[in-house]
Image (cartoon, rainbow, N blue to C red):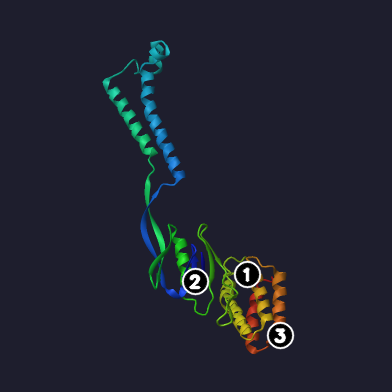
Amino acid sequence: MQINSEAIVYNDRIYPIKNISSAGLIERRQDYYMASSEYKKRRKRHNRLALMLLVLPVLYLVLINGPHVLGIPEFYWIALFPGFEGYYSESYSLIAWGMRAIAIIVWLRGRKRPIEQVTEYGLELQTNSGSVSLLWSIDKEFMSKLKDVVFKALSSTGTAINYSVNIDNRQFQDNSHNVLNSTTNITHDYSINFAEHKGLTSEQIIFLTNDFNKALQELARISTEKNNEDVVAELKELRDAISKPDPDPNLVKKTYGRLKGVCDVYDTSDKVMSLFKVIGAGVAYFLT
């Protein structure tokens, strides 16, 4: 599935964002046959129980008729199993037949594949032509994340959104950075997600997520408006170097130096210099 600022593409169908007014999660109860692995385990349990019910009456008969069946002297048998000196009654016969009947019922129930009723969650789109159920899944967390990405696309005024969603593996890939909006000629979303970066304190992550990312975004906007392609290219290199969970300090230092060098040539305004102070403070976290 592809979700961007222009459309949602899924199963060879395109849903233009401009035709979608809202999106939300809906629920339904659905019948599912038990999974094959669980069904096999269930059959084995029922088969074992049915076998036990069939074997127990036979064992009892062997006990009460042991001397005759096995050719063992009766006084030895009585000494080994007191109380089983040939005792047999009609009640035993009824119990034995009852256990056989129960064994057959248990075996038949084990062969029947149960149906489970589960809750499915669907992503519903409200379009100009009515509502559309885009996708159903029993994974509520995955569907909630998918809904949030669609909301981003619906509200992406001034920001380019581009996500690839692997439905089978339930994975999201954000390809939004460095997407060029051809209408406004502004490069969007040079910000970085620092949640998986190693060795950063909570205070550093807050600074990087807020002030540092805003400085990157603002420098990208100013440089693009002034057609400073060299600055934009070096800014991209710096972002790519820092966006890795464990950035290489030498690479970060080198790309930052190149970025500052081209900015000193093309733009030395007070605004850009103030942005570089913030960017430099953030870069310093990755040089130690």
Tag 3 residue = 264
Q: Amino acid at mark 3?
A: Asp
Identify the secondary structure beneath mark 3.
helix
Give left or right: position of 65 versus 187: left
Location of residue 192 (image quadrant): bottom right
The Cα–Cα distance between marks 3 and 1, rounded to whole angstroms, is: 24 Å
Mark 2: few/some/many CA within 10 Å (<14, 14-19, 20+) = many
Q: Residue at the far bottom: name it.
A: 269
Residue sitting at 33 percent across and 34 percent down? 105
Q: Residue at x 37, y 47 (%)?
A: 115
Q: Position of residue 150 (x, y in %)?
A: 47, 69
Which amino acid lies under the numbered mark 1 shown in the image of this protein? Ser
Mark number displayed over residue 243: 1
Residue 284 in view of the camera: no
Q: Could you say where residue 126 lies in the image, as x and y percent from the top left?
A: 39, 70
| Numbered disc total | 3
Left or right of residue 132: residue 185: right
- Local secondary structure at mark 2: strand
Rendered location of residue 252, percent (x, y): 69, 72
Q: Quadrant of residue 63?
A: top left
CA–CA distance between discs 2 and 1?
Answer: 27 Å
Residue 201, horizontal then vertical, whole percent: 59, 69
Q: Residue at x 45, y 44 (%)?
A: 36
Read off the residue under disc 2. Answer: 7
Q: Closer to us: mark 2 or mark 3?
A: 2
Residue 208 or residue 269, whichever sits in front: 269
Residue type at numbered disc 2: Ala
Q: Earlier in the sequence, mark 2 or mark 1?
A: 2
Secondary structure state at the residue bearing disc 1? loop
